[in-house]
Structure formats: structure tokens, C-alpha cells
Image: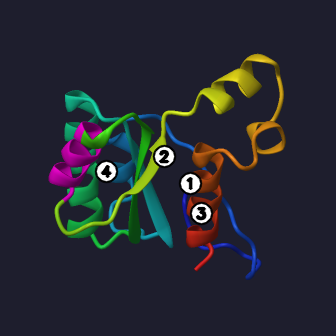
Amino acid sequence: MLGKLERPGRTVIADFEAGLGTVMRLEGRPVDVVVVVVEPTSKSLEVGRRAAEAVQAGKLGRLVITANRVRDDEDVARIRAAFPGLDPVLVPDEPAIVSAERKGEAPLDAAPDSPGMKALVALAESLLV
């Protein structure tokens, strides 16, 4: 259940299932930030675009678009075209992250200076604003 925190100054981050269901269930109960995560595929961008529109139309919270596994300029162009007027956080397709996860290591520990980790750290810091 989503709602106001009883103790101010606490941050709760929840990872919900993909799709529009969670956004639709907010039904006028805004949260501070909604992060819509997409990949540069047609299906993902379409679902993400619809989720972003629902968040904006329902004034459900500050909207942050995050594009994961971005490989090249073509991916960037597709992402930006899907979300005009927004400045998506672009997380590059990162072999160092995949390698760390396969080894059971935290990517932040294994590859803190990789472009992907830098993008994710910047995303996390932006959520605290």
C-alpha cells in the first residue's frame, strides 16, 4: 500500500512489476518521485511513454525517465523521441555491471568508475533532490 510515511525524513524505494498496473493503482495518491525505467526497444518505449503520460496526467509525482542498456546514438535518439520535453537518465549498456553480477559482486564495488555505475549513482543522487 502506498501512502504517507509516518516518520518524516525516511526514504522508501519500491521496485514494482513492469507495466502500467502500479501507476494506474496510484489513483490520485501521489508519491514524491516515479521512476519509469525503459529499454530502447519499441515495446518498452511504448509502455514507458504510456506510464509517463499517466503520471503526468494524474499529477502522481515528479517523473524521472531512466533508459537502461543504451548502446549507441540511435538508441539515444529513439529514447528522446519517445519522451519529448523530458531529459531521460541514460544508463549505458555496461559489460562491467554484467560481469560483476555474474560473479556475485556488487557492481558499485566491482566497477565504481564505469560509465554505467556513474550514471546509476547520478540517478540515485537526483532522486534525493
* Label annotation for residue 119: 1
Instruction: Name the front one of labels 4 and 1.
Output: 1
Residue at which label 3 appears: 122
Q: Nearer the viewer, residue 30 or 80?
A: 80
Please name the residue shown 40% across and 71% down the image.
61
Residue 90, x across and y down, in percent: 42, 51
Q: Nearer the viewer, residue 33 or 116?
A: 116
| Bounds of the magenta segment | 74-83
Magenta stretch holds residue 114 = no
Query: Which tag, 3 or 2, sits closer to the chain's start?
Result: 2
Residue 62, x across and y down, in percent: 41, 72
Quadrant position of residue 29: bottom left
Report, in whole angstroms, how far the alpha carbon at label 3 lies from the one at label 2: 10 Å
Report, in whole angstroms, how far the alpha carbon at label 1 lies from the one at label 3: 5 Å
- Callout 3: few (<14), some (14-19), or many (20+) C-alpha neighbours within 10 Å? few
Please name the residue shown 16% across and 62% down the image.
84
Quadrant position of the C terminus in the picture: bottom right
Residue 27, x across and y down, in percent: 33, 60
Instruction: Name the front one of labels 4 and 3.
Output: 3
- Callout 4: few (<14), some (14-19), or many (20+) C-alpha neighbours within 10 Å? some
Report, in whole angstroms, how far the alpha carbon at label 1 lies from the one at label 2: 6 Å
Is residue 115 toward the left or the right of residue 72 in the image? right
Residue at which label 2 appears: 91
Q: Are marks 1 and 2 in contact (CB under 8 Å)?
A: yes
Q: Are marks 1 and 3 in contact (CB under 8 Å)?
A: yes
Query: Which tag, 4 or 3, sits closer to the chain's start?
Result: 4
Quadrant position of residue 101: top right
- Give SS at disc 4: helix
In this view, the residue farthest toward the top is: 102
* Label annotation for residue 24: 4
Magenta stretch holds residue 75 = yes
